[in-house]
Image (cartoon, rainbow, N blue to C red):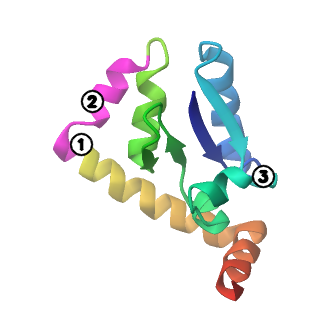
Amino acid sequence: MINVFYDGKCNLCSKEINYYKKVAPGGTFNWQDVNIKSNTLINYEIKTSDALKILHVIDNNNKLHKGIDAFIVIWKNLKYWNFLAKLAALPIIKQILDLLYISFANWRFNRLTHCVIAKENDKKL
């Protein structure tokens, strides 16, 4: 089962993940809102603030994927999205998508109160 860690308090993130949930084949994904306490993040040594900032996925081989790489894992496993996964994985396109995604993720993260609080809490640990 592919574990997907997403920010359920972010309206945009939730809408996208809810769409994926509707079109995903059953038994493929375990969708985990990182705002709901779980030992899974701790087990993979993922800080909550990092999981809130960018999408994290643990694939069937227990490998961690972040950002665009995480989306590629999801898209590879969704009917009709495989083409986008292949396109996004092309070197130049992937580099551009990485830059765009990280820029957007940082902007979104710094605007959301629950993300800023998680970042401050991580600093105290």
Judge left or right: residue 7 versus residue 102. right
Judge left or right: residue 4 versus residue 87. right
Residue designated by label 3 = 9
Q: Quadrant of the N terminus?
A: top right
User: Which of these two is toward me, 90 or 125?
Assistant: 125
Residue designated by label 2 = 87
Q: Identify the residue at horizontal 65%, vertical 13% (top origin).
A: 26
User: Which of these two is toward me, 112 or 89?
Assistant: 89
CA gap, disc 3 and disc 2: 29 Å
Q: Residue furthest bottom?
A: 124
The earlier-in-sequence mark between 1 and 2 is: 2
Q: Identify the residue at horizontal 63%, vertical 46% (top origin).
A: 5
Give yes or no for residue 86 being in the magenta stretch. Answer: yes
CA gap, disc 1 and disc 3: 29 Å
- Looking at the image, is 92 positioned above or below residue 121? above
Three-letter code for the amino acid on which mark 2 is drawn:
Leu
**Discs 1, 2 touching: Cβ within 8 Å:** yes
Q: Residues within 10 Å of mark 3 (few under 14, many from 20)?
A: some
Q: Identify the residue at horizontal 64%, vertical 17% (top origin).
A: 27
Q: Residues within 10 Å of mark 2 (few under 14, many from 20)?
A: few
Three-letter code for the amino acid on which mark 3 is drawn:
Lys
Quadrant location of residue 76? Answer: top left
CA gap, disc 1 and disc 2: 7 Å
The earlier-in-sequence mark between 3 and 2 is: 3
Pinpoint residue 33: horizontal percent, then vertical percent.
73, 46
Three-letter code for the amino acid on which mark 1 is drawn:
Ile
Pinpoint residue 106: horizontal percent, then vertical percent.
52, 67
Q: Quadrant of the C terminus?
A: bottom right
Residue designated by label 1 = 93
- Which stretch appears magenta? 81-93
- Looking at the image, is 3 positioned above or below residue 8? above
Quadrant location of residue 121? Answer: bottom right
